[in-house]
Image: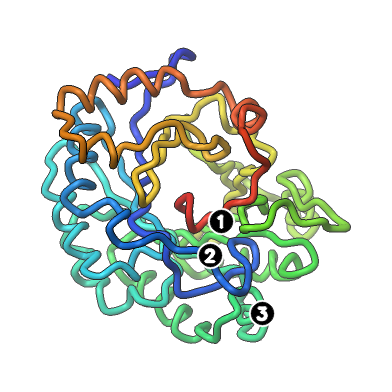
């Protein structure tokens, strides 16, 4: 089984399938985009399947497929089918911006996909276009409604951006009144291709929660799993719920059960580290499954206690895009 030196068992893999994206969200990348890698540098679907299979034999039972935007990668559904055939995996989750998923929902319902995390940072068409630098709001909202009607669990990811969308927080919560969804408010992080943004107000976990409480007389705390990234709540008599993810203040590290692999095969023990080993190169040099397992066991032992230590150990300040890391 995979475990680190702090006794945390690793059971969750976040796997980025591409660094490409069809949106240009301000908190993720500059307007001109990022320097995308050549196709040959990306892990192949066969390599991704092999990595997930080896990790599942070490106790990883949940995989989240991310990007960039995963549906931008050609034949992405074939990868989902391949990974779904792994009987050791209990669930597959997908994070998407919703632009290209609509015609694939019925197929996803037949596979081992459980949760769809839909990234949507505004419910206003013009503000959505301002944030994403693309005019796709109507398409994304149609996808939201289709996913809500499907058998898949729907979570909305909203990155709270000071001076940009904080006035919409209550509107997002009101979505949960009649919809069976969970809205997750995420602290803004510096993974935008530039670095930490200077703002007048720091909209962290406490400020977000206090803002919500000032608008509702009674908020119910919802019990979450031990390794949950979000602290979850509910407005009484509302069908859905909401959560807050302290992604930047990092108060969730103690129970972390995750590792990441980027689209080019870089293994990251923590979102805030530089990357610790290139799995792609190791595979292409002829590594056996046994050698892969030994490598994972050895490297996971080095997982830092929290994101602050990981960041302190970096060689360079944070300036990469979340699209490169895997959102």
Q: Nearer the viewer, residue 86 or 55?
A: 55
Q: How many residues crowd around disc 2 within 10 Å: few (fewer than 14), some, or many (20 or more)?
A: some
Name the spot of residue 5 as percent of width and height, x first.
Answer: 46, 13
Q: Residue furthest right?
A: 200
The answer to whether residue 21 is visible is yes
Real-space Cα separation, disc 2 to disc 3, in angstroms: 18 Å
Real-space Cα separation, disc 1 to disc 3, in angstroms: 18 Å
Q: Identify the secondary structure beneath mark 2.
A: loop
Marker disc for residue 130: 3
Image quadrant where residue 286 sits: top left
Name the spot of residue 144 as percent of width and height, x first.
Answer: 43, 74
Question: Of label 1 and label 3, which has the lower sequence position?
Answer: 3
Q: How many residues crowd around disc 3 within 10 Å: few (fewer than 14), some, or many (20 or more)?
A: some
Q: Which residue is mark 2?
A: 34
Name the spot of residue 287 as percent of width and height, x first.
Answer: 18, 30
Residue displayed at 78% across by 49% down = 207
Q: Which residue is mark 1?
A: 321
């Amino acid at each position: 089984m995979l475990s680190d030196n702090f006794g945390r068992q690793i059971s969750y893999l976040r796997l980025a399938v591409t660094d490409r994206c069809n949106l240009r969200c301000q908190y993720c990348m500059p307007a001109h985009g990022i320097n995308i890698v050549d196709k040959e540098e990306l892990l192949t679907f066969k390599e991704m399947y092999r990595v997930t299979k080896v990790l599942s034999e070490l106790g990883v039972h949940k995989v989240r497929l991310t990007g960039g935007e995963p549906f931008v990668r050609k034949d992405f559904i074939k990868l989902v089918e391949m990974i779904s055939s792994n009987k050791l995996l209990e669930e597959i989750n997908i994070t998407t911006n919703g632009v290209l998923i609509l015609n694939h929902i019925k197929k996803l319902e037949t596979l081992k996909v459980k949760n769809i995390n839909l990234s949507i940072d505004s419910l206003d068409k013009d503000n959505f276009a301002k944030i994403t630098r693309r005019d796709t709001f109507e398409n994304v909202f149609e996808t939201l409604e289709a996913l809500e009607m499907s058998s898949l669990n729907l979570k909305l990811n909203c990155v709270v951006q000071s001076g940009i969308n904080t006035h919409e927080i209550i509107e997002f919560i009101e979505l949960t009144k009649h919809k069976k969804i969970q809205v997750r408010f995420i602290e803004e992080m510096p993974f935008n291709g530039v670095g930490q943004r200077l703002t007048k107000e720091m909209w962290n976990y406490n400020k977000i929660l206090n803002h919500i409480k000032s608008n509702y007389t009674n908020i119910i705390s919802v019990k979450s799993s031990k390794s949950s990234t979000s602290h979850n709540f509910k407005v009484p008599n509302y069908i859905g719920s909401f959560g807050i993810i302290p992604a930047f203040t990092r108060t969730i590290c103690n129970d972390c059960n995750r590792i990441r692999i980027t689209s080019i095969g870089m293994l990251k023990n923590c979102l805030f580290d530089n990357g610790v080993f290139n799995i792609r190169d190791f595979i292409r040099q002829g590594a056996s499954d046994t050698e892969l397992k030994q490598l994972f066991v050895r490297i996971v032992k080095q997982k830092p206690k929290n994101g602050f230590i990981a960041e302190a150990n970096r060689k360079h300040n944070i300036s990469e895009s979340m699209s490169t890391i895997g959102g």
